[in-house]
Amino acid sequence: MLPLCPMEAVKVRVQTQPGFARGLSDGFPKFVKSEGASGLYKGIVPLWGRQIPYTMMKFASFETIVEMLYKYAIPTPKDQCSKQLQLGVSFAGGYVAGVFCAIVSHPADNLVSFLNNAKGATVGDAVKSIGLLGLFTRGLPLRIVMIGTLTGAQWGIYDAFKVFVGLPTTGGGTSAATQLTKA
């Protein structure tokens, strides 16, 4: 099995250069032939720079946002809200968390795309081509909509599964950790 970074490098090339390849099976050998095996890993630091903050923000912000929605936006206590409303709050909280995810990971996402699309390119080349401000802003509104929707759906599905198996949705009540510290 290939590590994720080489798959990301080939995926970006297939997406951004029409006719380069149909997919991973024919794109991988073409990529290695044109850039060498080390070319598959030139985007690894920006890839980590995208994925690590993205994931940290996704998990760090979701519950807090849901708690805040129940505290400030929903006039009814969570335990009196319908499951449909609770799942809507989960989606909304996930969407807002996704907006934060998109913002913190966007500069690195632009770097990953640039480095995997330009043969022999460096981070300096990306900054010269896109501009420092461009790394933070180029394509951000589209990324916000995409990542917000995706993250909202992920957290909505997560809480829907919790409801399906008889667990409560996220937020709005005393957490298990708080209950343990009070005991």
Image (cartoon, grey):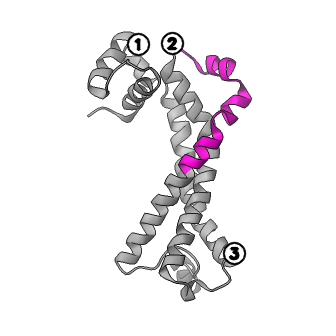
Relative to 96, does residue 168 appear above or below in the rendering?
below
Amino acid type, callout 1: Glu
Image position, residue 34 (x, y; %):
38, 10
Q: Which amino acid does label 2 sit on?
A: Gly
> Which mark lies nearer to you, 1 or 3?
3
Neighbour tally class for label 2: few under 14, some 14-19, many 20 plus, Cα within 10 Å:
few
As measured in the structure, the alpha-carbon distance from the residue carrying label 2 to the one carrying label 1 is 8 Å
Local SS, label 2: loop
Left or right of residue 11: residue 109: right
Kindly tell me whether residue 91 is visible in this rendering.
yes
- Residue 27: quadrant of the picture: top left
Question: Which kind of residue does numbered mark 3 sit on?
Answer: Ala
- Magenta span: helix, strand or loop, mainly? helix
Crowd rating for badge 3 (residues with CA inside 10 Å; few <14, some 14–19, many 20+): few
What separation in Å lies between label 1 and label 3 (alpha carbons)?
A: 53 Å
- Per the rendering, the mark at residue 35 is 1
Residue placed under numbered mark 3 in the picture: 73
> Which residues fall within the magenta stretch?
119-147
Circle 2 is placed at which residue position? Answer: 120
As drawn, 91 above or below 181: above
Q: Can residue 183 be seen in this view?
A: no
